[in-house]
Image (cartoon, helix red, strand yellow):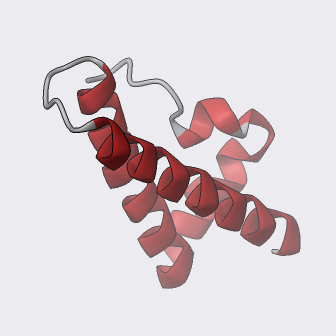
Amino acid sequence: MANTPHELAAEFPEFVEKMHDLKVNDAHFAKLADEYHELNRKVHAAETNVAPREELAEVDLRKRRGALKDEIYAYLKAN
């Protein structure tokens, strides 16, 4: 899934270097990024029917991904 949509680097291109530094030096940010990538892969797998889910479960994954993305953006802006 190398071309998975909604990767953090594509979502926040202006923060690519900062995200790399934070992943290496900030355990909390690294955990947030890992959680985001895991959720994003699940959403992508559901959307492409690689791992289909019930509609409500897929919607829940998208909502969780969106909330986590908002949290990551706030963290990037604050640090």
Res. 26 in view: no
Residue 10 located left or right of residue 39: right
The quarter of the picture where the C terminus appears is bottom right
- Farthest left residue in view: 51
Looking at the rendering, which quadrant does residue 9 occupy? Answer: top right
Residue occupying the point 47% across, 82% down: 27
**Foreground: 61 or 69?**
61
Location of residue 32 with respect to 56 vertically, above or below: below
**Foreground: 61 or 16?**
61
Q: Position of residue 62 (x, y in %)?
A: 48, 45
Q: Position of residue 76 (x, y in %)?
A: 76, 64
- Farthest right residue in view: 77
Looking at the rendering, which quadrant does residue 58 occupy? Answer: top left
Residue 31 located left or right of residue 10: left
Residue occupying the point 32% across, 36% down: 55
Residue 77 located left or right of residue 59: right
Res. 5 in view: yes
**Foreground: 39 or 20?**
39
